[in-house]
Image: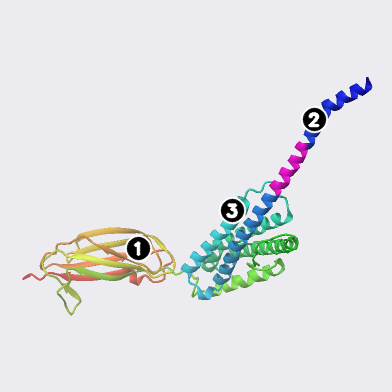
Amino acid sequence: MNMRIRNIVIYRILPGVLLGGILYSASIYYEQRQELEEYNLFLETSAAVSETHYLASEAFIQVLDFDLISREVFESKISDIVNDAQKGYDLLFYAELPSLNIKEKELLEIATSSWLRGLEIFESSILTLVDEPNSQKIEENIATSIAELSIGDKAYAEFLSLMELRNEDSYVPYLYKIEYIGVEDSSARFADLLVEKAKDSSAGLFLRRDLSVTGVEFTPKQIAETEEGYFVFNKEPVILNIVITNEGNRTEYDVVLLVLVTNNSLDTVYEKNVKEASLEPGRSKSIQVDPLELEPGVEYEWLIKIEEVENEEEIDDNLYRVKGYVPIDN
């Protein structure tokens, strides 16, 4: 009887035990496979992050030579560098690695986060420092940005060391050596030197705002010019063509041009305001004024003026005057 009971128990329980063992083994196998897949994805992602930040760090070193770079180029390049840092951050943090819990991943996360924060603060502060050299707050922001970059450098160096150990036992893709600034113990001194260098580089990064009227031409052209500087026109409508130029080193927005025409009785015969949405450094814009009928024997004066922008260096070239008339016997 006991033998029969034992056989029944074994017969009924054993399949469940076996099934449980199989399921447990399958679960372990699945977890190990998932971890392996995530680790391989981490290696692939790490290589992409490494290449992205290597190129960004090389570009960053170049833009620090303030004396050899214009403000316009600096703004463009530092913006590209920050965008690349954001890309490196996104590559890692949006990778599907929910189960991967290794020190290397933690260190790379610290590096990419610190680099991004440091570069963002640097971008928002460095030109302000040049324009406001006595701002203590901005100097502190620069120091913070350099410290963040150094933390990223140190975390990445530790990451590389651990990956080199793994490379002894398994395949690891090529990972660049990256250094934006250096280790933390030198970051404070680096920040001080950078601040002084930025302040002294007035030729390159120093804000220069300068709009000017660089060309004035009539269509049809004047037929003569008197000794007093008056233009002489035929009796037909004239169109004024004006060229304005941004001779500064920053893009100007909402550039306002005033065109005012008066006669010798000081009556306003024509007035127009033109607004340009933006004008980039070194770029010119041609503006055409409506045709104007000129009465013979009446002297006219055209006043062309660009509205002054804040802290503009040279304002004399914002104004242009020209006088002209149509002879009575024309």
- Side (left or right) of 292 relative to 135: left
Q: Tag 3: residue type?
A: Asp
**Is residue 80 at least partly visible in the picture?**
yes
**Which residue is pictured at 71% across the width and 48% down the height?**
35
Report x, y in % for residue 31. 72, 44
Q: Determine contact: label 3, label 1, CB under 8 Å.
A: no
Based on the picture, tell me whether residue 230 belongs to the magenta stretch: no
Up the image or down, 17 lies above or below 168; here it is above
Q: CA distance from mark 2 to mark 1?
A: 88 Å
Which is more toward the observer, 325 or 7?
7
- Side (left or right) of 323 relative to 158: left
- Residue for badge 1: 307
Q: Tag 2: residue type?
A: Gly
- Side (left or right) of 231 relative to 78: left
Based on the picture, tell me whether residue 31 belongs to the magenta stretch: yes
Q: Magenta residues: mostly which secondary structure?
A: helix
Q: CA distance from mark 3 to mark 2?
A: 46 Å
Which structural element holds mark 2? helix
- Residue for badge 3: 90
- Give the mark, 3 or 1, whose residue is nearer the N terminus: 3
Which structural element holds mark 1? loop
- Give the mark, 3 or 2, whose residue is nearer the N terminus: 2
**Which residue is pictured at 68% across the width and 62% down the height?**
156
- Give the mark, 2 or 1, whose residue is nearer the N terminus: 2
Question: Residue 213 lies in what quarter of the image?
Answer: bottom left
Which structural element holds mark 3? helix
Magenta segment, which residues? 22-35
Which is more toward the observer, 21 or 289?
21
Q: Tag 1: residue type?
A: Glu
**Which residue is pictured at 66% across the width and 59% down the height?**
111
Report x, y in % for residue 287. 28, 63
Report x, y in % for residue 48. 60, 59
